[in-house]
Image (cartoon, helix red, strand yellow):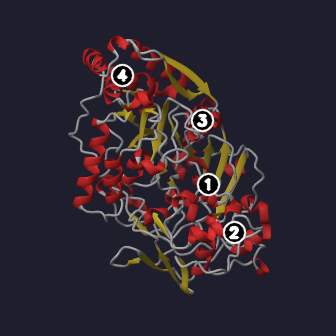
Amino acid sequence: MNGPKFLSIVIIIALSFLSACSKHQDSKEKVLTVIAASDIKGFDPIMSSDVGSAAQIAKIYEGLLSYHWLKIPYELIPNLAEEMPVISADGMTYTFKIKKGVHFQDDIAFPNGKGREMEAADFVYSIKRLADTKNQATGWWILDGKIKGLNEWRNKYQTQPSANYDEEVAGIKAIDKYTLQFQLSKPFPQFLYSLAMPYTFVVPKEAVTKYGPEFINHPVGTGPYVLPVFDQGKRVVFTKNPTFREKFYPSEASPEYKHFLGDAGKKLPLIDKIIVNVMVESQPAWLKFNKGEIDYLNIPKDNFSSTIVGNKLSQEMLDKGMSLTIMPSLDVYYIGFNFDYKIFQNVNLRRAMSLAYDVKTANRLFYNDTGFPAQSVAPPGLAGNVPSFKNEWKGPNIELAKKTLALAGYPEGKGLPEITLDTMSSTTARQKAEFFQAQMEKIGIKIKVVMNLNPELQAKIKKRAVQMIDYGWIGDYPDTENFLQIFYGPNSAPGANSANYNNPQFNKDFEVAVKMQHSPKRTELYEKLNQYLANEAVAIFTVHTQSYMLQQKWVKNYHDSDFIFDYHQYMNIDQSQKMDYLKKF
């Protein structure tokens, strides 16, 4: 999702939660329990600004497109769209055919409580909700400036009591009941990714009108699950949507996922019920997992070294029948400069600081030696990342760092004022900051560490009031453009470019790249831009992370993903294996 991905944010999902009563123990009902690491904020798609919210919303709501569950690299496929869109030759017009016979879930918002058929006009309404300033949608950024006439409609009603949703917007029209058309205001090949993000999932006007401000607590979508009651407590129960359309488990897969084809062709969803338990602390979840109550779990930091030995699952866990899934994440972590400060416009100073930083030791201390050293901003697996490319300014190389610092005009740090590093108020963040502080001391650079609560830190960044920050970015969609844009000048704070880096040549090349359809030429330009950022040392790039997910032996069809939020419908459980294990406790 948009914004930094902090190590402390972990969504631990899918567990089979057994009730104390013997009747439930004998049930054939397949139950998952999703553990949320923070309170559930609600179920309005336009507010799905974090991974946790998106995972809950995608149980109930759907979009025009989704990602193939069993394909790597990520592949967009039709979901509520009948097929992929027809795109005009100039790349400005996208025409979709909408699936017929898809109904919104039954709800009292509709006449007689029966959900009506979804139409193209529902997408027009939902996109306008995202644009309407009265709704304060956190996802507006994905369409800002991209759809013809939508910004003008948004601005027109910004100061009025309410917006006129019946007013036509040139760039989004329901041509007929089952035909939807978008006209872009400028070429943007990444546009289709936004239609697979929860922000653009379809909602019915009747439910928004019926529940008003409480709509966030009364979700009504077209998805595989319904939420009978949401009381914002610590336990939420989703049940299978009885009116869910005919949708089937995929019958083809990439080589990596061929072993997940056992349920090929079966009607979705495969699980009857999902229970969400909010558990902020990781250790209670770890104890439940080891008793067989949790189906799978992201390994807590404190238990990592005893669970993973030599980057493999420990014998103790193997003896219990557990398995390990390792999945590279599309993210990047870095220590960032604020280019508003003149000293950071000195490329040799930036290079010297990068050379002085011991990435290998940091990886061991803070990432359990599981991260990939980041050569630049683009993660492995994306066009633009060349595996053989090595950033010549990556440390540790103290001798070269000292020479480069002298070239910067600060021999042994003399004449360089103390530099402030802002970070979050957490134990890990403090330890990382103090490690950075110690690395810079080796070449004579003094660092002052300032701890901040997250809201305070974000406010400082938006006001361009930090010198350096310990930061990270998780991709919003699988395209290198989404990573390069965090150094694009016009995106400077309060936008995504927290570095406030503004290089005319980089900006020019980036603007060319983002208008290009996927092609070898675009890949070549992505590579050029990615390597340029490395050579200019625009940040001290540290690591790209991986997720380590433990699974019980009865869990089927699950793998980790950065972008696929509707995964629950594909999951399955071998109930007999599960019950046999639980009898031991």
* 7 or 105, nearer to the observer: 7
Vertical arrangement, residue 231 with respect to residue 436, above or below: below
Vertical arrangement, residue 355 with respect to residue 552, above or below: above
Task: Give the amino acid at mark 3.
Answer: Lys
Task: Give the amino acid at mark 1.
Answer: Thr
Q: In this orientation, does residue 561 appear?
A: no
Task: Give the amino acid at mark 2.
Answer: Tyr
- Kindly check if marks 4 and 1 are in contact, taking CB atoms under 8 A apart as contact: no
Task: Give the amino acid at mark 4.
Answer: Tyr
| Between discs 3 and 1, the one toward the N terminus | 1
Q: Which mark is residue 138?
A: 1
Determine the CA span between mark 4 and mark 2.
50 Å
Q: In this orientation, does residue 281 appear?
A: yes
| Between discs 1 and 2, the one toward the N terminus | 1
Residue 51 shown left or right of residue 155 in the figure: left
For this orientation, the residue located farthest to the left is: 388
CA neighbours of label 2 inside 10 A, class few (<14), some (14 to 19), many (20+): some
Residue under pointer 2: 157
Which residue is painted at 48% across and 56% down in the image? 564
